């Protein structure tokens, strides 16, 4: 049933007024009541979309994602389908589920080409590509973004593109294998040389203590103070390496995204 059937309803009017005033928490309450009244007659796609939008705008991305994922997309009319996909992608992105955010954009392309995306949706898609380290897609979309708004500062565009091309990311698998095979080397690969050398030194010391204790038949001492500590430092080093790699890649992506946001703010859509 179309939303216009409820245009005179007090719940919907109040909700819409609150939503347009960016009072999303309050609007959500009225939309939920309006949706409840609407479902007595038939499901309402527009009200459900508004509820998802309120969840996203109040930072409740889990509820927005769950509700958006449960929608019968094959049955949605084309008038609201793109908006649902965008809200689902936004919620997934904010939850750190970048692959699913990208999936929503892939599905969206079947009904709406990139050239027809809303500027905010296009920017979110670029940010998703950066998070997934899909450099070629990010570059193509930035060029599309610049062309759509007739951005004439080509030097500014090329500087951003060069920055994206030149940004190198740490490989989590490489770092993990280095940490497993040669303790401390994974941290050194991640750029934390001091911590890597310290980790390697501690593990060598523990290994030496274990060997010394076994040589002198101090088996309990070797196990309790040498081998146990070695095990903790070894697996702790592997976990620490994974954490450092994630943090470093996150910093590099965040820098690119911040520059992208600043770049986009200079455009007039």
Image: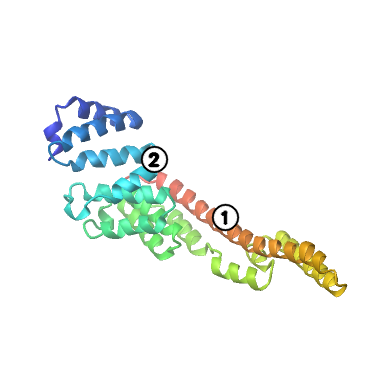
Residue 181, x across and y down, in percent? 65, 73
Q: Is residue 23 above or below residue 112?
A: above
Q: Is residue 104 above or below residue 35?
A: below
Q: Nearer the viewer, residue 237 or 135?
A: 237
Callout in the foreground (2, 1): 2
Residue 247 found in image quarter: bottom right
Q: Is residue 119 visible?
A: no
**Residue 1 vs residue 53: left or right?**
left
Q: Nearer the viewer, residue 105 or 235?
A: 235
Residue 74, x across and y down, in percent? 19, 55
Secondary structure at badge 2 equals loop
Distance from disc 2 to disc 1, alpha carbons, whole Å, reads 24 Å
Dot 2 surroundings within 10 Å: few (below 14), some, or many (20 or more)? Answer: some
**Residue 60 vs residue 71: left or right?**
right
Q: Is residue 224 visible?
A: yes
Q: Nearer the viewer, residue 220 or 247?
A: 220
For mark 2, what is the residue?
Answer: 60
For mark 1, what is the residue?
Answer: 247
Rendered residue at 17%/52% (across/down): 75
Quarter of the image with the C terminus in it: top left
Rendered residue at 22%/38% (across/down): 47
* For marks 2 and 1 on the same chain, the one whose residue lies earlier in the sequence: 2
Q: Are marks 2 and 1 in contact (CB under 8 Å)?
A: no
Rendered residue at 32%/49% (across/down): 88
Rendered residue at 85%/72% (across/down): 217
Residue 87, x across and y down, in percent? 31, 47
Residue 116, x across and y down, in percent? 25, 53
Q: Which mark is residue 178?
A: none
Dot 1 surroundings within 10 Å: few (below 14), some, or many (20 or more)? Answer: few
Secondary structure at badge 1 equals helix
Quarter of the image with the N terminus in it: top left
């Amino acid at each position: 049933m179309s939303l216009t059937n409820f245009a005179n309803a007090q719940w919907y009017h109040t909700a819409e007024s609150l939503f347009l005033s960016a009072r999303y928490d309050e609007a959500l309450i009225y939309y939920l009541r309006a949706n409840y009244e609407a479902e007595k007659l038939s499901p309402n796609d527009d009200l459900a979309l508004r509820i998802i939008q309120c969840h996203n705008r109040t930072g409740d991305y889990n509820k927005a994602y769950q509700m958006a994922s449960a929608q019968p997309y094959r049955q949605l009319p084309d008038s609201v389908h793109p908006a649902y996909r965008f809200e689902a992608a936004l919620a997934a992105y904010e939850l750190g589920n970048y692959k699913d955010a990208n999936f929503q954009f892939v599905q969206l392309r079947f009904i709406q080409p990139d050239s027809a995306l809303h500027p905010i949706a296009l920017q979110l898609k670029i940010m998703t590509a950066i998070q997934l380290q899909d450099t070629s897609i990010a570059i193509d979309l930035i060029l599309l973004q610049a062309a759509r708004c007739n951005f004439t500062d080509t030097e500014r565009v090329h500087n951003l593109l060069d920055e994206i091309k030149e940004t190198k990311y740490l490989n989590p698998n490489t770092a993990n294998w280095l940490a497993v095979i040669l303790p401390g080397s994974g941290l050194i690969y991640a750029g934390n040389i001091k911590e890597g050398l310290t980790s390697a030194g501690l593990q060598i010391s523990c290994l030496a203590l274990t060997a010394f204790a076994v040589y002198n038949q101090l088996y309990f001492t070797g196990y309790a103070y040498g081998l146990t500590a070695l095990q903790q430092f070894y697996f702790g080093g592997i976990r620490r390496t994974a954490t450092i790699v994630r943090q470093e890649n996150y910093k590099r992506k965040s820098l690119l995204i911040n520059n992208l946001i600043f770049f986009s703010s200079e455009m007039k859509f």
